Image: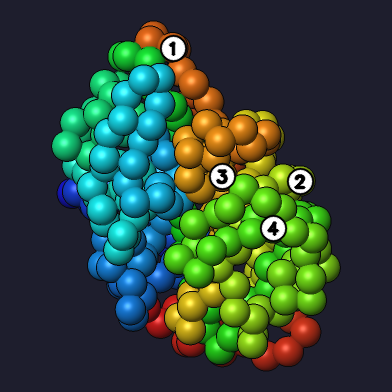
Amino acid sequence: MIVRIGDEIDGVSIDTSAGGRLASWVMAGCERLLVEPAAGIAPSLGWGCYLMAPFVGRVHQGWVDWAGRKIRLRLNGGHHSIQGAVFDSEWTVTSKTAASVSLSCPLDPSKWPFRGTVTQRIAIARGLMRLDAEIAADEAMPAALGWHPWFRNPGGHLCVGVKGDKVLTLQPDLIPTGELTPVDRRTDLRAGPNLAGHRLDDVYPAVRSPVVITWPDIELTMSFARPVGVAVVHTHPQAVCVGLATAWPDSIRLARAGHAGTGLVSLPAGEKLSAAASCSWVVRPAVQPVDRRLLSRS
């Protein structure tokens, strides 16, 4: 089911059968998300903007070793588990207005062995959208939350600003080692560079709000507060993912290994983990003519 809120100038469509994801996000009259799967990426992972919960990013070989339990998750990312347990589940609309929608999804035991429920709320106004998400634990569990948007990059003009001084050191299969490396010429996004020619699939583990994304015609500011503090930037010929999260990828293993600052939360039964991001956008002064047909093409 597709649920629409907002209008044709600033509005979103939510696909409840595809993980409750934003299937469309129109800002200033133009589509800003990749609305079909990116080439070379699993169809359920490479489009829209979906919620990651109750873990984010990759889990090494799908193994969760936590509180005396050792469990293997589904391997949906090659040799690893990836992006949580709800991005491809059916969600239920619990309330809706013209400008907001709330949804709920129980955790599927075939995808995550701990009982609980994930909820999210999306609210939109002119030039503004707020994303709220929450995990409620029915039994004790490790927990993390995040959002994974695929922003369209027509013509390669997208600029991304991330206030992060370090990146996680990654193995060739993108599993973090737990070590941190200062940003370099390739990974330094503090000045908001144009990403044309950049090849990134990197994790910024301690970022400061906001993250800023700029198209030729608008500027999007993604503001957040703790527990959100991790950003992931992944470039693709069709789009750029600029994700926000409360924890590192593979944080369960890394926290167990003694690495500090992973962001992993251990939720007791009956407790909740909540996170929010506020997204605002403004029209930029015209520096050069913008082909809006290119921006609006799906």
> Mark 3 touching mark 2, by CB under 8 A?
no
Is 249 situated left or right of 83 in this image?
A: right
SS at mark 4? strand
Residue 222 image offset from top left, x and y in percent: 65, 51
Q: How far apart are marks 3 and 1 (CA)?
A: 20 Å
Q: In this view, does 66 lie above or below 217?
A: above
Q: Is residue 137 above or below residue 187?
A: above
Label 4 or label 2, whichever comes before in sequence order:
4
Label 2 or label 1, whichever comes before in sequence order:
2
Numbered label attached to residue 268: 1
Decide if residue 21 is in sight here.
no
User: What is the three-letter code of the residue carrying label 1?
Assistant: Pro
Q: Distance between the residues labelled 2 and 1?
A: 28 Å
Q: In the depicted view, which residue is nearer to us: 120 or 112?
A: 112
Q: Which residue appears at 40% of the width and 47% of the height? A: 59
Q: Which residue appears at 79% of the width and 60% of the height? A: 182
Label 3 or label 4, whichever comes before in sequence order:
4
Q: Is residue 210 above or below residue 28?
A: above
Q: Would you name the residue on which mark 2 appears?
A: 208
Q: Would you name the residue on which mark 3 appears?
A: 248
Task: For label 2, count other residues whose C-alpha is less than 10 Å away and answer few (under 14), some (14-19) or many (20+).
Answer: some
Decide if residue 190 is in sight here.
yes
